[in-house]
Image (cartoon, grey):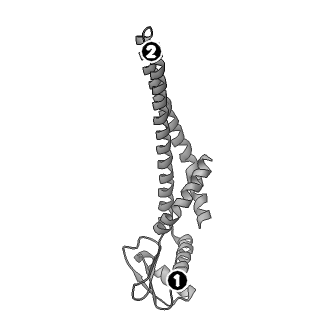
């Protein structure tokens, strides 16, 4: 599932990457142009008496501009990665038909493997009939119930609710995000 998610993220990220980086580069260029203009004006006003100070001011302005440009690029990259994850979550939440059945089956099988007979499988109301069908196919000895607070995926618990496994799309994304973020950054920016 991580491989499919990485492919999805990579496809979504390609177009977004170019727009964000172009905007960041343009912002950085504008900042550098403004800093150069300010430094040149200061140099003309004080050229005869403060030539050494003007050079120092220009270097400071350029350094500040480079720092601000770097901050803009980092911020743009962070927004881009967050946008990619938001789009991936949106697409996962909009699954229906065979892709939804496959995903729900995998989530149920994985979560239910940690419990014995009598487990409780909770899904959102819209997925209850599909979950019941999957439970029959997997030959699960489980009580299935709907709960509107389950946005996607499944929550599986012991009959007494002392042990719970959250296996929802959002939970999976949260667990995978640190590893996927570094992989995504490597794909996008080398």
The disc label shown at residue 128, or none: none
Q: Looking at the image, tell me whether mark 2 or mark 1 is earlier in sequence order.
A: 2
Q: Is residue 94 visible?
A: no
Is 143 left or right of 138, judged from the image as shown?
Answer: left
- Mark 2–mark 1 Cα distance, whole angstroms, equals 72 Å
Is 139 left or right of 46, judged from the image as shown?
Answer: right
The one of 43 and 20 positioned closer to us in this rendering: 43
Percent coordinates x, y for residue 102 in the rendering? 57, 74
Quarter of the N terminus within the rendering: bottom right
**Residues packed near mark 2 inside 10 Å, few (<14), some (14 to 19) or many (20 plus):** many
Is 18 left or right of 40, judged from the image as shown?
Answer: right
Q: Is residue 5 above or below residue 12?
A: below
Percent coordinates x, y for residue 57 in the rendering? 44, 22
Question: Residue at position x 48%, y 64% from top?
Answer: 174
Q: Which residue is mark 1?
A: 114
Q: Is residue 13 above or below residue 30?
A: below
Look at discs 2 and 1 and give the one toward the viewer. Answer: 2
Element assignment for label 1: loop
Q: Is residue 50 above or below residue 173?
A: above
The disc label shown at residue 43, or none: 2
């Amino acid at each position: 599932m991580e491989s499919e998610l990485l492919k999805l993220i990579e496809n979504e990220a390609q177009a977004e990457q170019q727009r964000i980086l172009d905007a960041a580069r343009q912002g950085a260029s504008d900042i550098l142009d403004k800093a150069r203009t300010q430094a040149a004006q200061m140099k003309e006003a004080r050229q005869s008496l403060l030539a050494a100070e003007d050079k120092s001011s220009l270097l400071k302005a350029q350094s500040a501009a480079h720092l601000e440009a770097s901050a803009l690029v980092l911020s743009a990259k962070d927004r881009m990665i967050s946008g990619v994850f938001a789009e991936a979550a949106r697409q996962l939440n909009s699954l229906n038909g065979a892709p939804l059945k496959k995903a729900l089956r995998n989530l149920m099988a994985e979560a239910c493997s940690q419990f014995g007979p009598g487990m409780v499988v909770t899904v959102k109301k819209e997925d209850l009939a599909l979950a019941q069908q999957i439970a029959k196919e997997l030959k699960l000895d489980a009580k299935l119930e709907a709960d509107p607070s389950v946005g996607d995926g499944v929550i599986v618990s012991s009959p007494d609710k002392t042990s719970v496994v959250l296996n929802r799309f959002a939970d999976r994304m949260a667990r995978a995000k640190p590893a996927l973020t570094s992989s995504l950054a490597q794909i996008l920016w080398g």
